[in-house]
Image: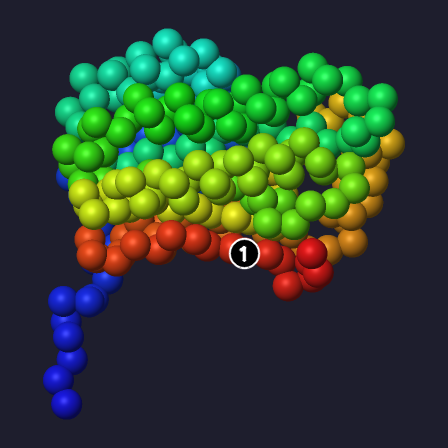
């Protein structure tokens, strides 16, 4: 019996260029570090420039290449400029990781609808703007786009209605995109983490919901950003003919 060695995983991303949004903390930082550790040149993008500069210095100290790009993904022109900066400074774009997002949970009744606008602008339109701007480069490179969604893109619940709507939109957009570009060599990957130890929940403006989320998180062993980064690396380091389209991961303690 022979073994098909062509299916062996090549763990190296040497020569590849990745752009990671929301890279100033949490999952975005972990993914940027992981991609760089595999040899990719990484453009790290977010609003908080000092944190990006720290991350770039850390990656460069490890002998890899990184550049910082200040970016608000709710600004379509800024998204286009970020993609062009990445290509100009690093020479290409092979992997786009759309990680930037907010999670402003709370009841629908008496909601502050500004929270809704922020979520839709960031979590939905930001993903669309970045994907649209990057697509010509990804098609040229036969590259990969990674969309950070959530288990909440599959299961709706009380206090998460608009966040659910935003993540379901990301899932639907990504599947439509996959059908449009997969035969042209571009892989579309949806990463759907459950409860993860990041600072997202601290930004919830509705105090009772913020407290409830904190209690929920304290009752389980959440995923870490490195867990999500490992899932992302698994998807982007598969052989070119293999498309890992969805990765759903939860803590073993999380039931829904």
Q: Residue drawn at (49%, 16%), measured in percent from left and top?
A: 74
Q: In which quarter of the image is residue 4?
A: bottom left
Is residue 50 something that shows in the picture?
no
| Above or below for 159 versus 66 | below
Given residues 150 and 35, the one toward you in this image is 150
Residue 181's x, y, as percent? 26, 41
* Residue at screen point 43% across, 46% down: 190
Q: Identify the residue at horizontal 63%, vertical 45% (top origin).
A: 152
Residue named by callout 1: 249
Q: Locate residue 210 relative to residue 132 in the image: left or right.
A: right
Res 17 quadrant in image: top left
* Viewer-side residue, 39 vs 9: 9
Is 185 positioned to the left or the right of 132 in the image? Answer: left
Task: Point out residue 222 in the picture as x, y percentages from the top left corner.
Answer: 65, 52
Q: Residue at x 69, y 45 (%)?
A: 156
Q: Where is residue 53 in the image (x, y as percent from the top left)?
A: 40, 19
In which quadrant is the N terminus drawn?
A: bottom left
Number of numbered discs on residues: 1
When asked about the image quadrant of residue 32, the answer is: top left
Residue 244 location in percent, x, y?
A: 35, 55
Q: Classify residue 187 as left or right of residue 156.
A: left
């Amino acid at each position: 019996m022979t073994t098909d060695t062509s299916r062996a995983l090549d763990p190296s991303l040497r020569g590849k260029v990745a752009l990671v949004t929301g890279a100033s903390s949490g999952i975005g930082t972990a993914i940027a570090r992981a991609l760089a550790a595999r040899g990719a040149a990484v453009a790290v993008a977010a609003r908080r420039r000092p944190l990006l500069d720290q991350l770039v210095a850390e990656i460069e100290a490890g002998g890899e290449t990184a550049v910082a790009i200040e970016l608000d993904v709710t600004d379509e022109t800024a998204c286009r400029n970020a993609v062009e900066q990445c290509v100009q400074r690093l020479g290409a774009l092979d992997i786009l990781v759309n990680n930037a997002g907010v999670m402003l949970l709370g009841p629908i009744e008496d909601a502050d609808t500004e929270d809704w606008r922020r979520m839709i602008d960031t979590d939905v339109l930001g993903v669309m703007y970045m994907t649209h701007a990057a697509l010509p480069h990804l098609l040229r490179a036969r590259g990969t786009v990674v969309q950070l969604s959530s288990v909440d893109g599959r299961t709706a619940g009380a206090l998460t209605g608009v966040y659910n709507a935003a993540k379901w939109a990301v899932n639907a957009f990504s599947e439509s995109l996959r059908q449009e570009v997969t035969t042209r060599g571009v892989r579309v990957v949806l990463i759907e983490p459950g409860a993860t130890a990041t600072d997202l929940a601290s930004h919830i403006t509705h105090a009772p919901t913020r407290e409830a989320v904190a209690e929920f998180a304290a009752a389980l062993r959440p995923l870490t950003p490195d867990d999500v980064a490992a899932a992302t690396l698994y998807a982007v380091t598969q052989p070119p003919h293999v498309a890992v389209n969805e990765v759903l991961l939860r803590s073993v303690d999380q039931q829904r």
